[in-house]
Image (spheres, rainbow, N blue to C red):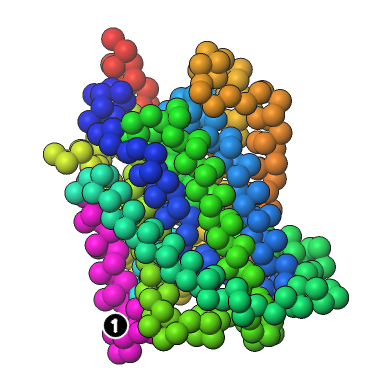
């Protein structure tokens, strides 16, 4: 079956607000709950500005991918961009990194379990983590429209929780915190930039909407609007959260900590519980659910092309790639049941994610030259020069963030090299199968 026919089995059910819900849910996740305190330790009262700078760093690659998604909308968009404009083996390598990066599924599930167990002492964290991972997996098996409905509910609740944190917290902010000498950059410019780079994980996520182009009703119009709009909305929310996080309690008390202490200080007990559930647990669950929604799309096409066994591309009666969803479910399940350290999971998963997303971003250099007709007909027009500038800024920003994320974990780079060597060898071996299938399809 051709790529177009296989994508034709996927229903075009996503409208603009569905995309906004998926985008916001993909962005708002464990990052805001876990990285804010770390950023405060690095940037002090400059945390709100660091969130805004992180959003700028994220919007640059989002703009590149929005241009591509509007001009050439497709399910598995980022994979198809790398395949068509850079090369087939490079595209498969990109997908292999994407699979490895989905260790973060376990991170989301474990983080959800941690918040749950803080409210229900004695609950088994492993069982809770497995349960939330399974719930999101099953919801996606029922179809992307069902997953989108769940996503909109989760997003509505978590945005309400974040809004309560801001509304109750802003009147208690001590504004002198932000005007004290050296308050904005206590660790200098490098510390501020490091904090902003780390926060790209908290503000990123909307770029993966480009994976859903084949399931959008009007991707040319809705994809760029949803990618940029969801990022800007969340950045503003995060900036206000940063003001409350820094300005209510002494900086030294909240540096390196989660938002729990500040929430206890500004919220009545019932609303505090709602914040932990709706802001903490729902934020992580929404990111977990959104990841299942987009993460199979590139592999679906790669399996059809022969890079994977053909059965991997099986589509259920509900129009979902159930085999690939199950593969990612297992990828997320293994670290949970084996008790792998959460920090190791998050740093490896996030570092790999920053690397693999650079491949589709790099196509921004050549899309005007290789597909001028699509660019000319796109509803979201950006000049070739402007797109090249955005692409350069995006790649530099993500490379810096990846280096900072891996930090001094030597084993991370060693694992990357070993994994890459295996995948590259497999790609050269499997290429013959891909070529033969392509030739047969063209006859």
Residue farthest to the left? 317
Residue 438 shows in this picture: yes
Residue 104 drawn in magenta = no
| Residue nearest the viewer, comparing 137 with 310 | 137
The magenta-colored residue range is 115-141
| Image quarter (top left, top right, bottom left or bottom right) of the N terminus | top left
Asked if residue 326 shows in the view, the reply is no
Q: Residue at x 66, y 56 (%)?
A: 52
| Residue at horizontal 41 percent and vertical 31 percent from the top | 219
Identify the image quadrant of residue 338. bottom left
| Residue depicted at 28% across the width and 55% down the height | 150
Say whether residue 146 is left or right of residue 243. Answer: left
Image label count: 1
In the rendered image of this protein, does residue 334 appear above or below residue 420? below
Residue bearing the label numbered 1: 124
Is the stretch drawn in magenta largely helix, strand or loop?
helix
Residue at the extreme top:
443
């Amino acid at each position: 079956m051709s790529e177009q026919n296989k994508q034709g089995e996927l229903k075009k059910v996503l409208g603009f607000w569905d995309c906004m819900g998926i985008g916001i849910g993909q962005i708002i996740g464990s990052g805001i709950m876990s990285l804010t305190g770390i950023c405060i330790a690095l940037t002090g009262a400059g945390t709100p500005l660091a969130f805004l700078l992180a959003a700028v760093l994220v919007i640059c690659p989002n703009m590149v991918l929005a241009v591509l998604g509007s001009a050439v909308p497709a399910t598995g968009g980022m994979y198809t961009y790398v395949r068509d404009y850079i090369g087939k083996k490079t595209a498969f390598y990109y997908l292999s990194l994407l699979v490895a990066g989905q260790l973060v599924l376990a991170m989301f599930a474990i983080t959800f379990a941690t918040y749950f167990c803080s409210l229900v002492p004695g609950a088994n964290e492993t069982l809770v983590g497995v349960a939330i991972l399974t719930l999101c997996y099953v919801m996606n098996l029922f179809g992307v429209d069902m997953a989108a409905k769940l996503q909109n509910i989760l997003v509505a609740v978590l945005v309400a929780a974040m809004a309560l944190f801001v509304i109750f917290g802003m009147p208690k902010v001590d504004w002198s915190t932000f005007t004290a000498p050296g308050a904005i950059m206590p660790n200098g410019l490098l510390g501020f930039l490091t904090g902003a780079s780390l926060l790209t994980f908290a503000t990123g996520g909307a770029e993966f909407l480009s994976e859903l182009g084949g399931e959008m009703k009007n991707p040319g119009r809705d994809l760029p609007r949803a990618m940029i709009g969801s990022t800007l909305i969340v950045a503003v929310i995060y900036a206000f959260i940063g003001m409350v996080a820094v300005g209510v309690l002494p900086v030294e008390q909240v540096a390196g900590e989660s938002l729990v202490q500040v929430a206890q200080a500004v919220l009545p007990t019932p609303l505090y519980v709602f914040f932990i559930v709706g802001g903490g647990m729902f934020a992580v669950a929404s990111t977990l659910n959104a990841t299942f929604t987009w993460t199979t799309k590139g592999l679906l096409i790669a399996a059809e092309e022969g890079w994977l066994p053909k059965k991997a591309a099986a589509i259920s009666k509900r129009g979902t790639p159930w085999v690939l969803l199950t593969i990612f479910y297992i990828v997320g399940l293994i670290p949970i049941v084996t008790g792998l350290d959460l920090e190791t999971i998050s740093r490896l998963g996030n570092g790999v994610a920053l690397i693999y997303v650079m491949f589709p971003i790099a196509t921004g250099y050549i899309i005007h030259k290789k597909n001028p007709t699509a660019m000319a007909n796109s509803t979201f027009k950006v000049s070739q020069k402007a797109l090249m500038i955005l692409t350069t800024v995006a790649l530099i920003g993500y490379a810096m963030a990846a280096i900072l994320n891996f930090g001094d974990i030597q084993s991370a780079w060693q694992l990357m090299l070993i994994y890459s060597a295996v995948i590259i060898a497999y790609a050269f071996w499997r290429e013959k199968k891909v070529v033969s299938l392509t030739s047969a399809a063209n006859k």
